[in-house]
Amino acid sequence: MKTAVVFLGGKKDSSDVFLREVVGLSSYVVAVDSGAEYLRELNIIPDLLIGDLDSIDPETLNWCLSKKVKVIKFSHDKDETDTELALKELASMGFESVLLLTATGEREDHFLATLLLLLQFSRTFELKILSERLEIGLVYGYRTLPAVPGETWSIFPLGESIPRVTLKGFKYELNAKKMPFEKPFGVSNIALKNEVEITAEEGKVVYFRWLKRPL
């Protein structure tokens, strides 16, 4: 599967070892604006630097230029977020899988904007938000996903329609149950098997898989 890794300008929420491992699984590395700072720390040269470049450190920008990194710069006055522009660029390149790293941080509004992009690109490629502790992805229709018994999973509706949700392989299973937005009963479920099944009919759900026990 043709996979790209995208470093955003959130906080560094994973170890260097983990970030290097994820980069090693990809064939293309993108820095979104100040996300290039983390790549410079890791001494990993991105294939692409993209965004309005309003938050990248000048020294890091010069480092990218000295390494002949491809740069796509946009105006600060735009309707799209830098992350959305990066995903549109990757869509035009035919990627099948995209992993968003360093996506969390103190700007909860930015994180929500990134989370909503799962909807826009759900049929373009497999898109996940990933850290050493947490994996976030979208399900519409039927999906079988790897799990570890004892892991905490939370599942919520996302999108315009109220989905009917079926869950198998969890402590709390569901059978085509409507999951309204204002009733978050999908929080803190527990995986019981090495594989779980999630079905979302008539809508979509977002899952939060805690790879390490949440605080």
Image: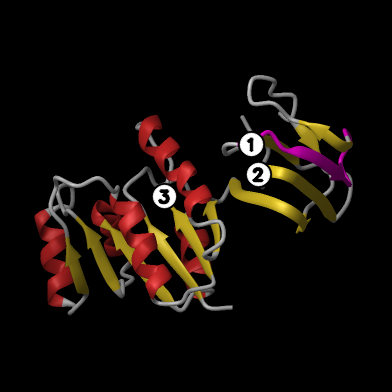
The percent position of residue 31, horizontal first and vertical second, equals 31, 62
In what element is the residue under mark 2? strand
- The segment highlighted magenta reads 161-172
Residue at image point 21% right, 75% down: 70
Query: Residue at label 1?
Result: 161
**Closer to us: 125 or 161:** 161
Would you place residue 2 above or below residue 144 in this image? below
Quarter the C terminus occupies:
top right
Give the distance between the C-alpha atoms of the residues marked 3 and 2, in whole angstroms: 24 Å
- Residue type at numbered disc 1: Ser
Query: Residue at label 3?
Result: 102
Q: Which of the marked residues, 3 or 1, is nearer the chain's N terminus?
A: 3
The image quarter containing residue 92 is bottom left
Query: Residue at label 2?
Result: 204
The image quarter containing residue 101 is bottom left
- Residue type at numbered disc 2: Lys
Residue at image point 46% right, 77% down: 94
Q: In the image, is residue 136 part of the stretch drawn in magenta?
A: no
Q: Residue furthest top?
A: 182
